[in-house]
Amino acid sequence: MKAIVQNEYGTTDVLTLTDLPEPEAGPDGVVVRIRAAAVDPGVWHLMEGTPYLVRLMGFGVRRPKARVRGLDFAGVVHAVGGNVTRFRPGDEVFGTCEGSFAEYALTTVDRVTKKPERLSFEEAAAVPISAFTALQALRNRGQVAPRQKVLVIGAGGGVGTFAVQIAKAFGAEVDGVCGTGKVELVRSLGATRVFDYTREDFGGGYDLILDTAGNRSLTSLRESLTPQGTLVIVGGEGKGKWIGPVGRNLRALLLGPFVKQKLRGLFSTENQDDLQTLRALIEAEKLTPVIDRAFSLVEVPEAISHVHEGHARGKVVITI
């Protein structure tokens, strides 16, 4: 099979299109013929091995343990292990795996489910990682509730486009912050007000702020919260080779015990229950992926660079 392979850390120059053996299902595995994959900002960090904290978290100190990048996918079941009863060859599925930038990938039953019928393979592949992050940030960390006033910063990006829709589905009043070219998109997703950060500030009085952009200080974000509001910090870019964007999360954790406002970070997790929740929202037409551009497998380096530059409207996908 063809796959985008990485044997060392670095920029997109370390990625090559290579022939690899097709994965085998084993007793408990599910082999999927990948039809589409998605690119999230974390792919750049895993490719480059920065911040160095990424390497210490088990991804490989000197070189990456996983040679093929990519987590999100949608495709067709190719083979299943003898212990697998939930799926059979030919089923259309979506979920996560280790190495979706390839023609075939191995996953497990707890990381995959049936593809929503109303979505294309490209749309379904765009969902898992970014929508997991949005859902867990709003529901688990932010405890979003009906009639709350919620602000999503970075509302036109991969996580942000899902967050606006999920907050709306939970009954909140949602505002968004984004760049000029994404204002109409964010408004179309259900945001009550949309602030163009190049021209205006967004004021205050928010019960919950989800910040995916990473370029505002904790002080300025707290000023926009109600006295007992909640700030959830997700991703974002930060300087420093060792901890990078994790720095704001750590500062929020240290400051949290001394203020009435709730300051929280998030490291999202993949799980079957949340994948089913997202699928239900999609089937109820409360959640629809936004696709910026589609690239081919050979164009994965260009796709990763495009996402890293921060200008994508919604998600970038790989068609395989």
Image (spheres, helix red, strand yellow):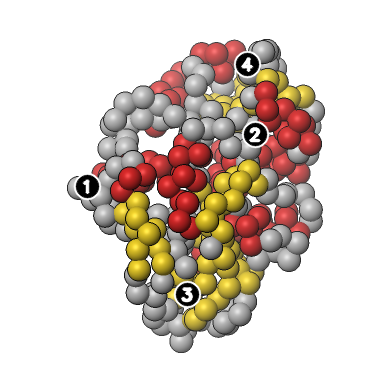
**Tags 3 and 4 touching, CB below 8 Å:** no
**Tags 2 and 3 touching, CB below 8 Å:** no
Query: Neighbour class for label 3 at 10 Å: few (<14), some, many (≥20)?
Result: many
Q: Residue at x 63, y 57 (%)?
A: 122
Q: Residue at x 49, y 81 (%)?
A: 80
For marks 2 and 1, give the one nearer the viewer: 2
| Sooner in the amino-acid sequence: mark 3 or mark 1 | 3
Question: Mark 4 = which residue?
Answer: 198
Q: Marks 4 and 2, how far apart in space?
A: 14 Å
The answer to whether residue 186 is left or right of residue 100 is right
- Looking at the rendered structure, the kind of residue marked 3 is Val
- Looking at the rendered structure, the kind of residue marked 2 is Gly
Q: Residue at x 35, y 68 (%)?
A: 19
| Sooner in the amino-acid sequence: mark 3 or mark 4 | 3
| Sooner in the amino-acid sequence: mark 4 or mark 1 | 1
Look at the numbered disc 2 and give the secondary structure of its residue: loop
Q: Quadrant of residue 144?
A: top right
* Residue 12 x/y as whole percent: 36, 44
Query: Neighbour class for label 4 at 10 Å: few (<14), some, many (≥20)?
Result: few
| Sooner in the amino-acid sequence: mark 2 or mark 3 | 3
Query: Neighbour class for label 2 at 10 Å: few (<14), some, many (≥20)?
Result: many
Question: Mark 2 = which residue?
Answer: 156
In the drawing, what numbered circle is on residue 31? 3
Visible in this render: residue 118? Answer: yes
Question: Mark 1 = which residue?
Answer: 61
Q: Quadrant of residue 164?
A: top right
- Looking at the rendered structure, the kind of residue marked 1 is Val
Q: Is residue 150 above or below residue 274?
A: above
